Image (tube, rainbow, N blue to C red):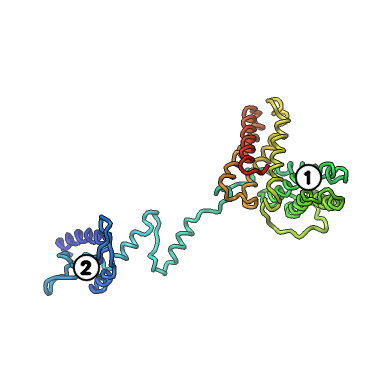
Amino acid sequence: MNVSSSSHWLCGSLLASTLLLASAGCGSSDGASNGASAAKDPKAKSEKGETKRSKTDGSKAEGSAGGPAMIDGIYKDVFFDKPLVVAANTQTGAAAGNTTVAANDTSKGTPATDAATATKDPPKAATGGEAVSLKDLIDKDALTSEIKNVRNYLAGKAGSVAAYNASYLEIAPESATLAVLAIAVQKHPEDFSWKKNAKFVRDLSTQITELTSSDKAKNKNTYDTVAAAFEKIDDILKGSTPAGLPESADEKEYGEAAVDLRHIMKRIQKSEATLKTTVSNEAGLKKEADKVALEGAVLQFLGYAITTDGFGWGDDAGFRKQALPLREGGKQLIEAAKSGNYPMYDEAMGRISKTCVECHGEFKNN
């Protein structure tokens, strides 16, 4: 192409881009084909928003006999053969900085699928879309200690009919907590000697929760069933696999195992009450540092667990917002216990008490 043709080519390219943005038809190498396509585009919007029919006059190739073909006085050879396809391929994915293929180009796979796969976010937890590390919520030592505490509590209640009847209404929050903790053992990245049998501890604990919160709770037959279930739990926690274990699914949601959110809420209230009566000054915090740290870990973990889908609150932003200070307060208790910082402890307790009151007022689970 000579210098004159180059100038025509540059001007023609600018005009071609303008014509593309205006959605007007352009001539192609075969002339009539693109003229027909333009005629099929019946509407184009003016700057004032009025609808008018696209003009195709002047889109026809013209020129002197034997001379180069022209469009509106511009050499036809400066126009792309298929300008709409070129424009689509150039603009697609430009905003995101990704390389894509035309929708009708099947030689490189399906662009929509490829793009979705390349940019798909990793799976998120139910709690407001955040990724949660179970190890950061409750470490192995805290998890083991709390399970031991619940085991000792249930041992006392299952020891005799008299002990059971005296406080059977207090059992469900503990057994429900054990069921949830058993799931934590299953999911935890660290190893536990009874991890392979954790699902049985979960389901046996759920059975105890259901029985002791039923209208037949204060019954000799119920006691016998609870005592038998606890005996199996105790054997598993000691490392054995007792006979007669129930059929158990490999996985369950925290809420499904706990039976009722109110049982876990009562366990949370127990932590708050225990800490309020145990620690009232810096000396008490230093003396009971281990207990404070453990209760903090339990609160942090339960504050997360109650917002999962199994409890039915996974998609409730209001409930998740109410539960967040519980988790944050639990974490703050752990830090206060480690440092002996009583003002930090006192602030954490204030946050926990406040969120419990506000949550109960709104969701009426007390």
Question: Which image quadrant is residue 103 in?
Answer: bottom left
Quote the CA–CA distance across marks 2 and 1.
84 Å
Image quadrant for the C terminus?
A: top right
Judged left or right of residue 243, residue 268 is left
Q: Secondary structure at mark 2?
A: loop
7 in relation to 29, above or below: above
Place of residue 63 in the rendered image (x, y in percent of width and height, measured from the top left): 13, 70
Q: Secondary structure at mark 1?
A: helix
Image quadrant for the N terminus?
A: bottom left
Mark 2 or mark 1: name the one nearer the start of the chain. 2
Disc 1 marks which residue? 171
Rate crowding at label 1 as few (under 14), some (14 to 19) or many (20 or more) other CA atoms within 10 Å: many
Place of residue 17 in the rendered image (x, y in percent of width and height, measured from the top left): 25, 59
356 in relation to 341, above or below: below
Rate crowding at label 2 as few (under 14), some (14 to 19) or many (20 or more) other CA atoms within 10 Å: some
User: Which disc is residue 56 wearing?
Assistant: 2
Query: Label 1 amino acid?
Result: Ile
Judged left or right of residue 183, residue 94 is left
Query: Label 2 amino acid?
Result: Thr
Place of residue 349 in the rendered image (x, y in percent of width and height, measured from the top left): 65, 33
Place of residue 324 in the rendered image (x, y in percent of width and height, measured from the top left): 59, 41
